[in-house]
């Protein structure tokens, strides 16, 4: 299985074209958002001293190099909220300009969006460009895919189905029958059935505005951290939606590419290496985004200690966490308090 990885601007530890080159045989796609554009993560080019212009120039040069390696590029227009512009001519123009810029860079193979309006704008103006429904749309049924079939060519299924092989098989069969593609996000650390997601996604979409607006501030960047910081809830990180590198091969019947969340990850090389090699020696939380490993009193969860029956258990349990006890038991066996 190949990997789809999220672009980062260069820093002291990573130059993205070099990173792609090092794992070229394992990478089929790089996805990216344009600088200053709202997306499902913090806007590119607003941190670490970058100006929007410098970020745009660097992004374009890096993506041209990556496209030159034969790696496909996927443009993200996937903010969860576009405010009063959500159905505007202004947003339509912005989408057109974004696609034109992506066309100049080259290598564009798809656009991923959360917006029905953006999807329709692309279908009208750029009908040759495949449009994928973002994982943040939480699509998890054939009915949902049917409702969107006139303007989406592919679907990232909702995270909660990652450990539900029977449901995946049904979605894949429908997609194959109707000429659609099905996609997977492998290393999300988000809570299963996260009650905070809508609030958090909207906050991220307006992150720049929020940062410049006076308010009480928050302890954590995401509200799920407040819930998980309580030690009695720590075991729940095992009940979430992520897939171990060692288990990715089980999904090859349905997917030829696995998307990895790496746009904001502090160590993208580590994540890519783990999933490219199909093994990882370390704290499983370190591979996830968000990882929750930085929570106070959160122990190290040693991936090597996860039992051999893990995949068969968590893909057949029906996610009955209140009555099962399996993940809590595994947590107690793999947790280390202190240095690893």
Image (cartoon, helix red, strand yellow):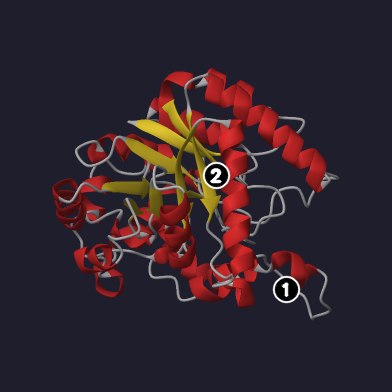
Q: Is residue 281 above or below residue 36?
A: above
Towards the viewer: 336 or 33: 33
Would residue 98 be visible to someone looking at this image? yes
Q: Earlier in the sequence, mark 2 or mark 1?
A: 1
**What's the residue at 61%, 48% (across, down)?**
98
The percent position of residue 68, horizontal first and vertical second, equals 55, 20
Image quadrant assignment for residue 244: top left
Q: Nearer the viewer, residue 77 or 328?
A: 77
Mark 2 lies on a secondary structure that is: helix
Crowding at dot 1, Cα within 10 Å, few <14 / some 14-19 / many 20+, comes out as few
Give the residue at mark 1: 218
Would residue 229 be visible to someone looking at this image?
no
In the shown orientation, is residue 142 left or right of residue 276?
A: left
Query: Which mark identifies residue 286?
Result: 2
Q: Quadrant of the N terminus?
A: top left
Taking 186 as reference, is 115 above or below it?
below
Q: Quadrant of residue 222?
A: bottom right
Position of residue 115 relative to residue 330, above or below, is below
| Lateral position of residue 78 relative to residue 171, left or right | right
Residue 135 % position (x, y): 41, 58
Rendered residue at 68%/69% (across/down): 206
Instruction: Decide: few, some or many residues near mark 2? Use Cα within 10 Å; few <14, some 14-19, many ≥20.
Output: many
Q: Position of residue 85 (x, y in %)?
A: 62, 72
SS at badge 1 = loop
Residue 115, given in percent of the width and then of the height, sits at: 47, 65
Cα separation between marks 2 and 1: 23 Å
């Amino acid at each position: 299985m190949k990997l789809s990885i999220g672009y980062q601007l260069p820093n002291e530890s990573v130059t993205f074209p070099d990173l792609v080159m090092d794992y070229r045989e394992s990478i089929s796609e790089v996805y990216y958002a344009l600088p200053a554009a709202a997306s499902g993560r913090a806007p590119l080019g607003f941190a670490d001293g970058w100006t929007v212009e410098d970020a745009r120039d660097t992004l374009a040069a890096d993506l041209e190099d990556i496209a030159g390696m034969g790696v496909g590029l996927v443009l993200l227009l996937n903010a969860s909220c576009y405010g009063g512009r959500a159905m505007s001519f202004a947003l339509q123009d912005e989408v057109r300009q974004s696609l034109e810029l992506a066309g100049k860079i080259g290598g564009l193979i798809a656009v991923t969006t959360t917006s029905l309006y953006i999807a329709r704008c692309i279908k009208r103006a750029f009908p040759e460009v495949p449009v994928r429904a973002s994982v943040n749309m939480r699509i998890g049924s054939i009915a949902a895919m049917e409702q969107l079939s006139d303007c989406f060519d592919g679907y990232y299924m909702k995270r909660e189905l990652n450990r539900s092989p029977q449901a995946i098989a049904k979605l894949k069969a429908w997609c194959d029958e109707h000429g659609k593609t099905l996609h997977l996000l492998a290393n999300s650390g988000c809570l299963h059935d996260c009650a905070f997601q809508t609030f958090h996604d909207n906050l991220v979409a307006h992150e720049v505005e929020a940062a410049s607006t006076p308010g009480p501030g928050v302890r954590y960047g995401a509200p799920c951290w407040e819930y998980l910081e309580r030690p009695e809830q720590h075991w729940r990180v095992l009940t979430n939606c992520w897939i171990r590198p060692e288990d990715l091969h089980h999904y090859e019947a349905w997917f030829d590419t696995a998307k990895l969340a790496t746009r904001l990850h502090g160590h993208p090389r580590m994540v890519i290496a783990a999933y490219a090699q199909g093994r990882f020696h370390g704290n499983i939380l370190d591979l996830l985004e968000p990882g929750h490993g930085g929570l106070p009193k959160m122990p190290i969860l040693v991936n090597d200690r996860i039992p051999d029956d893990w995949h068969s258990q968590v893909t057949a349990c029906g996610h009955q966490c209140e009555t099962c006890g399996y993940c809590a038991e595994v947590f107690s066996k793999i947790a280390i308090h202190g240095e690893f």
